[in-house]
Every structure is written in structure tokens, then in C-alpha cells.
Image (cartoon, rainbow, N blue to C red):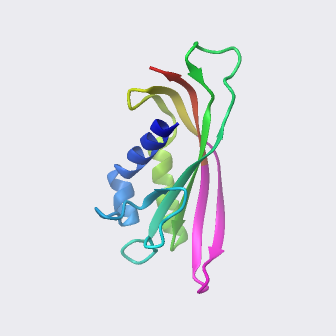
Amino acid sequence: MKQIKKWLYVTIEADATFRTLTGRTATDPRIYYGWMPEVATLSDTKPAYSTYFEIVTGPVPEPQVMDVQHGDEIYQIDVWAQSMETMEDVSNRIYAVLHDQRSVDAYSTYKIQRVHMESKSDIMEEDEGGLRIYRKSMTFRCEVIYDL
């Protein structure tokens, strides 16, 4: 649901520690839905960025908690960084901001009863130039979502 996507973006992007760790500027938020734009590169002043996207919307669980309930949504959030230390710092910050959030109001449209991390994994990649990129991939579940 687009309001939940927006809530995730605003919640992470507004965090002052996330902004500092990633090198966020007014023109480059360092968090992107889907994939980063080509202009968002890794550098000493912009050592990390994050991408996120919805990977699954589940069926409404039985028994339904309430008539206006929706299926859970699971989002993948990736942190891409120049160093393992930066990757860990940014991913730990996202975890601190999102994990175990309760009774979230997603723009006066939906209420999310709980957000929690379900999994995480480390992935090392190389770009075309042979530069190592450290990546942490995490999944977060938004559960018991209902209309307000």
C-alpha cells in the first residue's frame, strides 16, 4: 500500500543518524524505492545508501482481527556501502528505527499494529570497476494492518 511505502521512506529518511551515516543532502535523500538512480554513487562524503521495496503482501489471516484488516506486507530493505563497518552502522540504525514499532499510523489511512525484522543477510558484490560493495539485505514485516 502506497501509504505504508511512504511511511517507511519518511521514517528512515527523517532519522538524523541515518542522514549523517549516509551523507544525505537536500537533493540526495540516500534512500530510494526499488533501485538507486545512477547519480547516487558511493564516495567518501556519501558512503552508503539504502533501497527498499515490497516483496510480498500476504492474505488476510484467519481469524480476522477486525473486518477492515488487510494482509501483512513484507519489505526488503538493503543497505549498500563502501565498507563493512558503514554497512553495519547504517543497517543497525534502520533496525533501531523500525524494529518493534507498534501501533503505527500510516498517514491516517492505515494502522500497523507491529513492524519487525524477519531476516537479514550480508552480501558482498563488485561493481564493473572491481570496487567492493558491502550490502546488508533485511526483511521487515508490517503486520495486522487495518483501515482507520
Residue closest to the far bottom:
129
Q: Eyeballing the image, is 84 above or below 56?
A: below
Q: Is residue 140 above or below residue 40?
A: above
Q: Residue at x 46, y 63 (%)?
A: 49
Question: Residue 69, position in %: x, y?
Answer: 58, 20
Residue 90 is a magenta residue? no
Count of numbered circles on the image: 0
Q: Identify the residue at the far left of this view.
A: 26
Q: Residue at x 49, y 21 (%)?
A: 147
Residue 7 image position (x, y, % from top left): 43, 40
Whether residue 19 is situated above or below residue 41 in the rendered picture: above
Q: Say whether residue 123 is magenta.
A: yes
Residue 76 in the image: x percent, y percent? 60, 50
Q: Which residues are magenta?
A: 117-138
Quadrant of residue 104 within the rendered picture: top left
| Residue 2: percent from left, percent from top | 48, 39
Q: Residue at 58% x, 13% y: name it.
A: 67
Q: Residue at x 35, y 58 (%)?
A: 19
Image quarter where the C terminus lies is: top left
Q: Magenta segment, principal secondary structure?
A: strand
